[in-house]
Amino acid sequence: MKNARIWFKKDLECRYISHLDLNRCMLRALHKSKLPVWHTEGFNPHPFATFPLPLSLGFRGINECMDVKLEADNYSFEEIISKLNACLPKGIQVFDVTEPSMKAGKIAFAKFSIKLSCDKINSSTIAEKLSEFLSLEKIEFEKKSKKGIKTVDINQGIKTFQIEEKFDFVTLNVVLSAGSSDNVNPNLIVSAFENYLQLPVYADITRIDLYNSDMELFR
Amino acid sequence: MVSKEVEKLLLKVQKPGRYVGGELNEVIKDKNSVDVRFAFCFPDTYEVGMSHLGMKILYSQFNNEDYIWCERVFAPWIDMEKEMIENNIPLYALESGDPVSEFDFIGFTLQYELSYTNMLNMLKLSGVPIKSCDRHDLKQIVVAGGPCACNPEPIAEFVDLFFIGEGEEVDLEVIDLFRKCRKEGKSKTEFLQLCSQIEGVYVPSFYEVSYNEDDTIKSFTPKNNAPSVVHKRLIKDMNSSFYPDNFVVPLIEIVHDRAVQEIFRGCIRGCRFCQAGFIYRPVREKSPETINAQCKALCENTGYDEVSLSSLSSSDYSQIVLLLEKLNEWSKDEKVSISLPSLRVDGFTDEIMDKIKTVRKSGLTFAPEAGSQRMRDVINKNVLEKELLATCETAFNGGWTTVKLYFMIGLPTETMEDVEAIVKLGQAVVDTYYKCPNRTKGRSVKVTVSASSFVPKPFTPFQWEPQDTIEQLHEKQSHIKECITTKKIQFNYHDADTSFLEAVFARGDRKLCKVMELACERGFHFDGWNDCFSLEKWLELFDECGIDPAFYANRRRSFDEILPWDHIDYGVNKSYLINECKRAYENTTTPHCRLKCNNCGAAKYGEGVCFEKRKNMV
Ligand code: SF4
């Protein structure tokens, strides 16, 4: 059996589906493609796939991945790509298949590109306020979880950032703690920024890449 | 396709995947290279609408024609509706993202009466005038079909034309006619006039209704050369009729997320409360070969690993065992499971159970509909208690531990004794479980008893019957609750308030149009959902319009009264329905179509079960 890491983008309409929906969509595509993917055993066998780091509803992702086990060797990676793409909606398209070189648990950082815009203020004001906001010593935000409300300092989770001012929006490129332990969801930054501005902003968020703790590209 | 404006709203609402399209197998065309654009509207949420088979069939069939682009539209949930209104975004179709108001046809499928307000609300959200007489041009033609079209009168003022009966043929004839009329520069009235000559098309504006002093109907007069009786359309050969080899596969979870294969239309049984059992007569089957091939194609093209065989009563398919054998030949290797819903109590044999072993053991559902044998005879549900118990025994010994039983309360002639019998039957099922030697050890049984309130429907033998009042229904519900003494029986019941409104709309006449109009003005929507429904508000509306809803729901009609739907013909003679109603009051059952033809009238179509050779004929 061969491990394969399937790389895809999640974009267009598919950016609005949850991780659970994505999972179902992928399983169906694997089933439809008839690729020799290892299936779970039991009463309702289905293709087995895991996702190193799920992507939240609403985000685009340009380097997303899913791990499967291939039961046969007689398929080239190109063939897998084209077979899967024929079974997927246009918002989810596979572009590469690799042999995984890092374990999912190694993921420590994720890079996002966040396009911010606001009806009420222009982009130079957004950029200005954003850099003010990000240079605060602490960015406290109340995070609601099952255990209740706790205050977190988001700033701790921001590794690097860079602001680009465009004509009608501002792009914030940011590397955030990611993975199972200290995950910072970029939505938190957006909400905290909205609080800071006291204005609603529209954020179009794309996950660009994943990294390990040495900032090596997750592959 | 999602516009920039809509994009900004999507992250503020629940389940934005409902509003974006972009699914596998969605049909995208170039709008400049098609002649007719059809907005297929389902007046409920995406998850409900996308589960509906009729929509899948027509979507595929329309898009199969190069000159038509059919797109899907669903009712936005209240959070999205609010955002759309606040941001001035009109209702749009999922495929192109274009406003519904730009379409040539705006078509609704009407599956339940409580979706009427959603239909009007969707027109309103589209910025399209809701009344037919306010839409003057040959565009935005509002059409409607589905089972509720059998009594179109409560919404007659809003819909330009109704499709009566099965849509596969007549819809395309109308769309084609539209294309011709537009080329020739004809007016909307000219177009509708030509439509009204097509069998299966009802143009309500071509009929005038007059009323008696007592508010019953005096006469129905056609004008513009429209026929005095509109006959339903029906597909004669199910094997050659269109069936999609492809479904749009939703990105988000929907109510029924699987491939669906229709196996036959109609029902042989003739349960007296069941509208579907009469309006889809006669039974017409697909051959096992056709079903097998269609199932296979569907699974291959969608990637679904479950296919559900759809019909009103799947175990009545005449070659069910042979069919399951055929399906089993490939389904196991393809890791596809077959499910067989709508099983009758007497249809769940060992043989069938063996063949559907691949189905998840989530629970079994049966519909005895009534608790006592007398009551079941009245409604012509030819099921015996011992058959039900034997079936449960088979299931329990086969590993099932939960059973759902569906009943109705408020049936004609029902007494409190009949109501109690519902609980007794539930208890008998519990007892059966503990008598089964091969039951799952260490698990207790769960029997869910579900009681809905009877709603008298047009084209059934009970179309003249009064519905129980809400108070009577409540009394019966609480009586059932009191009678249940074990935790092994769980009791569910439907809200009597919604059943009452359903009964008003189901047998309403044109006078209700003004109530509907006002409801739309006041922003009524999603009446089928507890989140939105308020009987109190409806009663206020009726009151304002000077209409007594009890006139429609709770009044006994006489056999010689002109009913609002009498100018529509579904193939079953009124005299047959009258006779069936009388037999009900005599506690007399009527054998089903395969045992004996009872000359209901549907043989005039020259097809189906009416012409089968009967085995036990003397
Ligand atoms: S004509 Fe006879 S066989 Fe045909 S549907 Fe009616 S009762 Fe059944």
Image: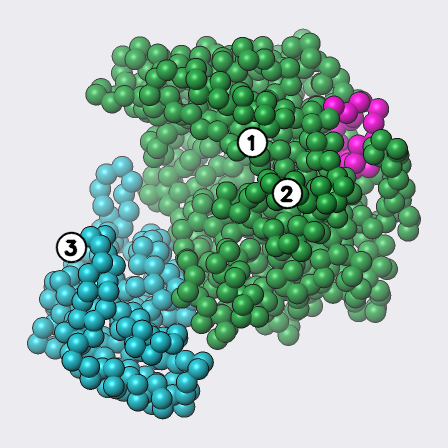
Chain colours: A cyan, B green
Q: Which mark is residue A1?
A: 3
Residue at image coords 49%, 46%: B531
Which quarter of the figure is the C terminus of chain A placed in? bottom left
Q: Which residues are magenta?
A: B556-574
C-alpha gap between disc 2 and disc 1: 14 Å
Would you say residue B571 sits in the magenta stretch?
A: yes
Is residue B291 toward the left or the right of residue A22 in the image?
A: right
Q: Is residue B483 above or below residue B511?
A: above
Q: Secondary structure at mark 2?
A: helix
Asked if labels 3 and 1 touch by Cβ distance under 8 angstroms, the answer is: no
Residue B139 is left or right of residue B263, and the answer is right
Label 3 secondary element = loop
Q: Position of residue B500 (x, y in %)?
A: 62, 33
What amino acid is found at the position of numbered circle 2 in the picture? Trp
Kindly identify which residue carries mark 1: B496
Along the viewing direction, whichever of B72 and B135 lies nearer the viewer: B135
Q: Mark 2 highlights which residue?
A: B538
* Vertical comparison of B220 with B524: above or below: above
Q: Residue at x 41, y 58 (%)?
A: B14
